[in-house]
Image (cartoon, rainbow, N blue to C red):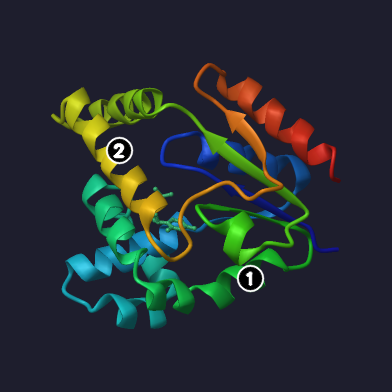
Amino acid sequence: MTFTIAIDGPAAAGKGTISKAVANKYGFAHLDTGLLYRAVGARMLDGVEPIEAARTLSQDALEASNLRTHEVAQAASKVAAIPEVREALVDFQRAFARRQGGAVLDGRDIGTVICPEAEAKLYVTASAEVRAERRFQELQGKGSDLSFDEVLAEVKERDARDSERATAPMKPAEDAVLIDTSNLSIDDAVAAAIRAIDSKH
Ligand code: C5P
């Protein structure tokens, strides 16, 4: 059995949490495709040319521990605008999507470019202020001294770069179910996602 669930949306909207919960509920494998771009971004920060980094990406690079920093997030969003970088990552994502047993992929262009035939598509969003507040709390917990305004500016900068790029811009697929998590608890957001998927299952 193959069944692909595509979950797209901007940073800190709740995609990751929803994707993990949904994968767990259906017993599907989960791929956080942002990690691919983060791994390429991290290698660029180490001086590797990004297209070369994307073409030679290894499993080890995806499991590196330093991919969740905001420097790497910004680098990821820069390399993600390079068409050859995106192209080099397509086959891996499509193969993952069609694996036996079902797959959940989360990212920016899964429902539009990587898996336009996905059986279920969600677009998870929230206001920039709510997303920045979540990121700010998370960063404070890690001892960061960035202010809320700095975090908000970074969220907006990354949104703009991701949605305005020419290749595979972040946007909802026409047939995606929209879930705005601005005023939802995690449990309610997961329940909304499961209702949307069950209606296609
Ligand atoms: O989701 P995450 O914050 O880890 O993504 C990091 C960056 O990778 C995004 O800002 C975006 O530029 C890029 N990305 C992408 N397409 C995807 C997943 C992530 O362009 N499918």
Can you give x and y, in whole percent of width and height, for residue 98 in the image?
73, 68
Q: Hey, which quadrant is residue 127 in on the image?
A: top left
Is 130 located above or below residue 105 in the figure?
Answer: above
Callout 1 crowding tier (Cα within 10 Å): few <14, some 14–19, many ≥20: some
Sequence order check: which comes first, mark 1 or mark 2?
1
Residue in view at x 78 percent, y 54 percent = 119
Q: Which residue is mark 1?
A: 94
Q: How many numbered marks appear?
A: 2
Residue in view at x 21 percent, y 24 percent = 148
Q: Amino acid at mark 1?
A: Arg
Quadrant for ligand 1 reads: bottom left
In the rendered view of the protein, which quadrant contains the N terminus? bottom right
Q: Which residue is mark 2?
A: 156
Can you give x and y, in whole percent of width and height, for residue 112 in the image?
60, 58
Q: Nearer the viewer, mark 1 or mark 2?
A: 2
Q: Which mark is residue 3?
A: none
Residue in view at x 60 percent, y 37 percent = 18
Q: Taking 106 as reference, is 116 left or right? A: right
Is 55 located above or below residue 41 in the figure?
Answer: below
Q: Hey, which quadrant is residue 147 in on the image?
A: top left
Q: Taking 131 as reference, is 149 left or right? A: left
The front one of 161 and 187 is 161
Q: Amino acid at mark 2?
A: Lys
SS at circle 2: helix
The front one of 92 and 24 is 92
Can you give x and y, in whole percent of width and height, for residue 114 in the image?
60, 65
Is 70 located above or below residue 168 in the figure?
Answer: above
Question: Can the viewer see residue 97?
Answer: yes
Residue in view at x 35 percent, y 59 percent = 38
* Measured Cα–Cα span from mark 1 to mark 2: 29 Å
- Circles 1 and 2 in contact, beta carbons < 8 Å: no
